[in-house]
Amino acid sequence: MRAILLKAFGGPESFALCEVPKPVPQAGQILVRVHATSINPLDYQIRRGDYADLVQLPAITGHDVSGVVEDVGPGVTGFSPGDDVWYTPQIFDGPGSYAEYHVAAASFVGRKPPSLSHLEAASLSLAGGTVWESLIVRAGLRVGESILVHGGAGGVGHVAIQLAKAIGARVFTTVRETNFEFAQRLGADVCIDYTQDDYVDVIMRETEGRGVDVVFDTIGGNTLSRSPDALAQLGRIVSIVDTAQPQNVIQAWGKNASYHFVFTRQNRGKLDELSALVERGQLRPHVGAVYALDDIPLAHTRLESPNNGIQGKIAIAVDQRLSDSMK
């Protein structure tokens, strides 16, 4: 099978398209023909060596799968060849999704939402699971509360806006003015151009000095350290960013706030919950760009580029038929 191998830590040129053996499902596993995957910040962080101690080279990376069951191993009863499935491969535990085939434990795999294409489903599995973990499990966002989503036009942020709106929250988001219309279509109530306005000032004005109940951070750095300034009493800050920068704990303490740092965990339950939202018309991933499997280095370059113009996710058409249909 064809696969993109990471042969050394570094830039996008560290990838190489190679022929590797097709995996064979063992007991409790299924073999999936990958139709699509997508690019996440975690992917380029791994590529450049941020987690070098956890990745053995050469490696097949990638963290989203949407495809069709090719074969099942002994003991698997819930899936059959031909089933459409989606899931996130176990992170730092075996080969990833930048390949034509992938083997996974059946317990982590969900049935693809029928209304989503493979490109759309592959753009939602990791991002959607991360948002569910962050807003539902960790923040406990409730109807009638308010939330600030940092980076609402991005791959994770645009899902967070939709999920928060489905819960019944008032949604603030930081985006460039060029993305206001996009964020509003997703359900954002208040858009803040972070290049022109101070988001803390805007939130305090819009909430009459109260602040928001939850801040969801997808950016880190100064954005995360200033987030307590925008919080209401008993507020919660949830960040998915790996950062060593000291946080504004004094201000958070004064708000009786709680911090949650999320590294998403895989399970079928989250996929099933996301599927239900999709089928009710409350959630839909946005595919902002599509690349072929052998163009993954280009996709990495674009995602890492500041102001890359991407709304939502960058999807990868692994199946050659999807690639051909784009031409």
Image (tube, rainbow, N blue to C red):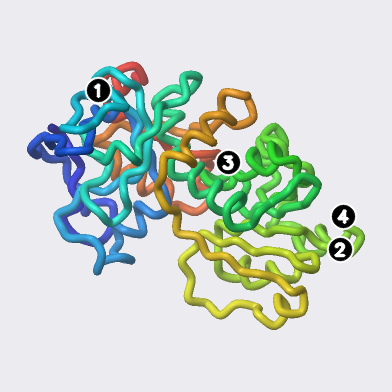
Q: Which residue is mark 4?
A: 206
Nearer-N-terminus badge (2/3): 3
**Residue located at (55% from left, 46% from top):** 132
Judging from the image, what secondary structure is the residue with disc 1 in? helix
* Nearer the observer, 315 or 247: 247
**Residue located at (77% from left, 74% from top):** 255
Disc 2 and disc 3: Cα gap in Å? 25 Å
- When the figure is inspected, residue 111 is found, relative to residue 58, above or below; the finding is above
Circle 1/circle 2 CB separation < 8 Å:
no
Nearer-N-terminus badge (3/4): 3
Amino acid type of the residue tagged 2 in the rendering: Arg
Q: Which residue is mark 2?
A: 210
Q: Residue furthest bottom?
A: 250
Which of the two marks, 1 or 3, is nearer to us in this view? 3
Q: Which residue is mark 1?
A: 320
Judging from the image, what secondary structure is the residue with disc 2 in? loop
Rendering coords of residue 310 (x, y %): 51, 40
Amino acid type of the residue tagged 4 in the rendering: Glu
Q: Quadrant of residue 225?
A: bottom right
In the figure, is residue 106 to the left or right of 74? right
Disc 1 and disc 3: Cα gap in Å? 28 Å
In the figure, is residue 106 to the left or right of 131? left
* Nearer the observer, 278 or 198: 278
Circle 2/circle 3 CB separation < 8 Å:
no
Rendering coords of residue 270 (x, y %): 49, 41
